[in-house]
Image (cartoon, rainbow, N blue to C red):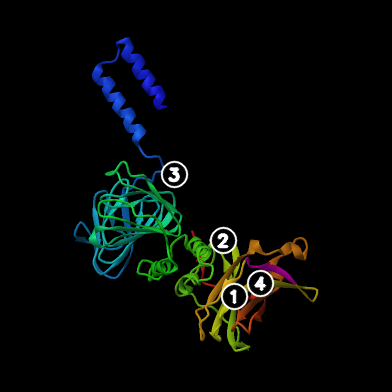
Amino acid sequence: MIGKLFALVRQLRKSGRLSRWIWVFLATVSLAIISQPSLSPSIAQSARITEATIAEIVGQQVLINRRLVGRNEKAKLGERIQTTGARVELKLNTGAIARLGTHSALVLGSQCFQLQQGRVLVNGGSSGCTSSVQSRVRDATYLLERLEENKTHYAVLEGEIELSNPKLPNLAAVSVQEGQEIIIEADGRFNPVQPLSHTTYEEILLGELMKDFSTPLPNLIEIQQTFETLYPDQLFPPYLAQLIVDKSFRCPSNFVATYSPVQTQQDWTTQLSLSRLTSARQGGLLIQLKVVNKPLTRYANAVYQIYALQENRWVPLYTNTGARLINNQNGSLPPMSETIPLEALRLQALGDNVNVENLELKAVVKIRYDLSMDERDLSLEIEETQAYPDIPISNCFPNH
């Protein structure tokens, strides 16, 4: 394309139909196009930002241009959003979510929102920038924060972002992928991209930008999957796992399960809950394992299964993919959940035209654990059996 443009300019110049100044202008534009850094093929230009709506406030005092504001108020292009003792969730017109921490401030720009102080957690396809660094985002969840000495920190939990510095055009753009972080110097120079440690990742998940908000991030299940892929020997924070049902459903913070009587096996005291998820178009089953007491373990995991009774025989309909890690600490643990969409049940194993509402189902949780190097591969099974119509309906709801 650029070669054709130069050829056209030369042809017009020779024919005398192009003045010297227009020729200089076109050549300059051509060179400017050539010098622009190319984007990663997978990362598109972020959508233009025009406004941000105050979706939720945790704490007190959120200001727009020094004016105290409340929920559902809007900030327009060029306006400054600031927090003191509050945290705030912003919904951008692009569909992205930005959670601004305490004692933080940002200004809405058309191509990005510029973080001036503090920290912001971004979920979706909008770019967070500073006075010297620009980012381009396809669809990611990342933390942006201003550090001491005017340094900048990006940490990507899920997805990918691309960073550039328009003030240093000779500095190549940098891609930061999920499970990576980068610190940028005050003058805009990039330090090498580093792996995001499990400790740092977990600190973000347990920090002020994830806790106490009434609604979890839309892609929380993708964050969990990324976390478990990056750190296969680590446990995803249970309080976040509790909020996850699947891509179609989520449970509110006041979710209450109906548990079976306490079962005690091999120093494990547990309870099991089986409940139904319903909506106008879809449904599912929710199994919750509550560990009232357990021994100290070196390793422990759980596998969730569903069986149906047919002709006095239990037929397997579902087994989760991969084992779910269980915290090794002794004592009680927060409830652990497994959600099974009805479409995932292998009803064809029972024959044609089987209606799940006519079935008696059994939920089984198989736990395997190691106590020591000498006591390994120990196991136990926890069961709960109910006819489908008698399974209680949960107060979880569709995630749309």
Q: Earlier in the sequence, mark 2 or mark 1?
A: 2
Q: Are marks 2 and 3 in contact (CB under 8 Å)?
A: no
| Three-letter residue code for mark 1 | Asn
Using a 10 Å C-alpha cutoff, classify the residue at mark 2 as few (fewer than 14 neighbours), some (14 to 19) or many (20 or more).
few
Residue for badge 2: 280
Residue for badge 4: 305
Q: Which mark is residue 391?
A: none
Tell me the CA gap for discs 2 and 1.
34 Å
Using a 10 Å C-alpha cutoff, classify the residue at mark 4 as few (fewer than 14 neighbours), some (14 to 19) or many (20 or more).
some
Helix, strand or loop under label 1:
strand
Looking at this view, name the residue that lies furthest to the top.
Answer: 15
Residue at coordinates 47% horizontally, 60% vertically from top-left?
219
Tell me the CA gap for discs 1 and 3.
39 Å
Q: x, y percentage for residue 312?
A: 79, 76
Q: Earlier in the sequence, mark 2 or mark 3?
A: 3
Helix, strand or loop under label 2:
loop
Using a 10 Å C-alpha cutoff, classify the residue at mark 3 as few (fewer than 14 neighbours), some (14 to 19) or many (20 or more).
few
Helix, strand or loop under label 3:
loop
Instruction: Report the magenta residues as a range.
Output: 315-321
**Residue in front for this viewpoint, 24 or 221:** 24
Direction from residue 6 to residue 21 in the image, left or right: left
Q: Which mark is residue 40?
A: 3
Residue at coordinates 67% horizontally, 71% vertically from top-left?
306
| Three-letter residue code for mark 2 | Ala
Residue 54 in the magenta stretch? The answer is no
**Residue in front for this viewpoint, 35 or 361:** 35
- Label 4 or label 2, whichever lies nearer to me, is 4
| Three-letter residue code for mark 4 | Gln
Tell me the CA gap for discs 3 and 4.
42 Å
